[in-house]
Amino acid sequence: MKRIRAEILSVRRLGVYHTLTIVAPEVAERARPGQFLSVAMPPDRVFLLRRHFSIHQASRRGGWAGTLEFAVESQGSGTEWLAEARPHQFLDVIGPLGTAFAYPARLTNCLLVCEGRGGAPISFLAQELRARGKRVDMLIGGETQDHVFKPIEAKRIAQTIRVATADGSMGDRGSVADLLPEMVEATGAQVIYAAGPREMLRRVAGFCVERRIPSQVVVEERMACGMGQCFTCVVPVARKDGSGYDHLRACVEGPVFNPARILWDRWMGEVAEPAPTPPEGFPVVRSWPG
Amino acid sequence: MAGVKPAVVVDLAGVVCPLPVLAASGGLAPGGGATLVDLRRLGGVVTRGLTLGPRRGGPTPRMAETPAGLLSWTGLQNPGVERFLLEDLPRLEQAGVPVVVSIAGSSVEEFLRLVGLLQHRPAIVALEVYLGAPDEERGRGRPFAARLDRAVEVVGAVARMSRLPVFAKLPYLEPDLVETARACVRAGAHGLTMIDGVPGLAVDADRLRPELASPIGLLSGPAIKPIALAAVHRVAQELPDVPIMGVGGVATGRDAVEFLLAGAWAVQVGTAMLVDPAAPVEIARGILAYLKEKQLESPAALRGRLRPPRGAP
């Protein structure tokens, strides 16, 4: 993990996303698919926490050596500011953060599944897998065609690709998870990787467990620091020995997890559990200010 | 006269910190972001609130960003004292930074057992009794701080047993802040840490749900700075000889100076470290620059130097 001042080289608009390319050789050198960056917000504004983005591209060689790319979906004060950023502006960046996808040693047929901005880490992974001689097939989607992340690039990298959007504006109507059985059948997938919304990841997890296909997913959880300090971004993950579960930080122990070990019901708030006592009940305000 | 070279060491009535800026409880965890800061340049590190056994904490979402603040509640997730002693403390010891251990028992007995396990480690310079911890013994899960008798009982028990100085961490309590502070000191607290996060609720109007699963969280960050300053000011006026560590929204050197002027002896930095783990180093530098500018010799020279408001008799 390094902290650097990184210059913005370019900002490109792609559907609902903006992709930013920054000069960050110390980070690009180490960055692997699945890992993320954190970007500080401008100090002259009202205090804001850092924002976190999956690494979409890390160039180590060639004309773009030492650059990193990430995708911003503007959804509020911090991300809007970044979407409006201009080349030659400097960003306070920390990275690479978190765990990376593991590459299969022997198995060769990889199916990559993503929805929305989950496409950013997945397309980085696709390239790395291809560079290792693996077969890559992709299932990509999003709410609308504007949410489908770089479909043309996906087509270029992948052996075959299927697209699904919730409104049917591109590819099939529905979720990419609907296409899983057909796609596995057609491609002989031996490993599945996924990134995107929880509902989709949960279906991928269920499918992989049922078919006994090894898989890894990138999760998103609300995160304050991204560096392991605040313990807010935890995910309930079953212990290997079956003796219960732990709350693991998506920023340090994740964001890449084996989805078969995530307790999805619990994570998605469907298990009524006696939550530990919240910090309520004080102060009893009788006079204010004293 | 440009000869004044300020010293930054602070002596909290026996607890000596090389700098007047400490990492607050929850601001820093070994590993992770801690690798981005030279720990020897901190005045000290206050640990996450520790319990006897490991705590998994509550479900997510655990945080929401609110105007100039962070609303969060983890449910006291921590590795438990055993793993802390085995894994976390050695890393802090190695870094050579003074350690203040925050203890967060759910009963008086748990607090005392924590003291017994912690007080013989040389890197630990003080204990901080987290009075925001839910009292499961007599308080039906309300914080110890919510009842004066319970706050006094736990602080007194810890102080009697502990060979280390004890700081009581208080929330902003109305109307009994000064009374509670005084009672904690009478019970044996060496000093006070003020304030804990302020209870708050964030609402997601689209989903008609609270943003946090808890659903009440503690608000931290610049949003609570004036509240924390008020607490420090009120208590420092009544108890000028009691070391106070000011905490709540300190993000710049200027913020820290404000706390010192209001009567704090040192400051702790929490939420700002989540944005910049090296924030305390910058803050200490800011204090030093202010001291130089005002030709003062040490942070102690600022303590309580706040003048009466204009027009006061």
Image (cartoon, coloured by chain):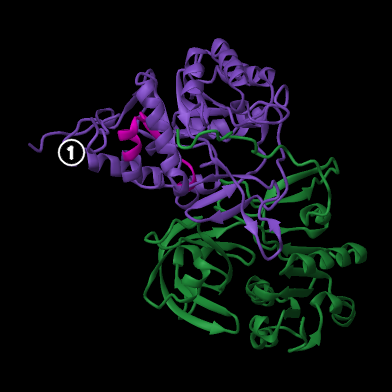
Chain colours: A green, B purple
On what subunit does the disc labeled 1 rest? Answer: B
| Image vertical order of residue B200 relative to residue B206, above or below | above
Q: Which sits in the foreground, B109 or B184?
A: B184
Query: Looking at the picture, how far across and down is residue B5, in whole percent?
Result: 18, 34
Disc 1 is placed on an element classified as loop
Q: Is residue A181 visible?
A: yes
User: In terms of image quadrants, where is residue A226?
Assistant: bottom right
Looking at the rendered structure, the kind of residue marked 1 is Lys
Q: Which sits in the foreground, B18 or B129?
A: B129
Query: Looking at the picture, how far across and down is residue B129, in whole percent?
Result: 56, 25
Quadrant (top left/top right/bottom left/bottom right) for the C terminus of chain A: top left
- What residue is at 80 percent from the left and 41 percent from the top? A274
| Image vertical order of residue B175 relative to residue A211, above or below | above
Q: Is residue B268 visible?
A: no
Q: Residue furthest right?
A: A210
Magenta residues, as a range? B258-272
| Image vertical order of residue B159 relative to residue B128, above or below | above
Q: Is residue B235 left or right of residue A214?
A: left
- What residue is at 82 percent from the left and 80 percent from the top? A174
Q: Is residue A28 left or right of residue B266?
A: right
Query: Looking at the picture, how far across and down is residue B307, in whole percent?
Result: 24, 33
Query: Looking at the picture, how far across and down is residue A25, in whole percent?
Result: 45, 67
- What residue is at 75 percent from the left and 63 percent from the top? A216
- Find disc 1 in the rendering and name its residue: B294
- Number of marks in the rendered image: 1
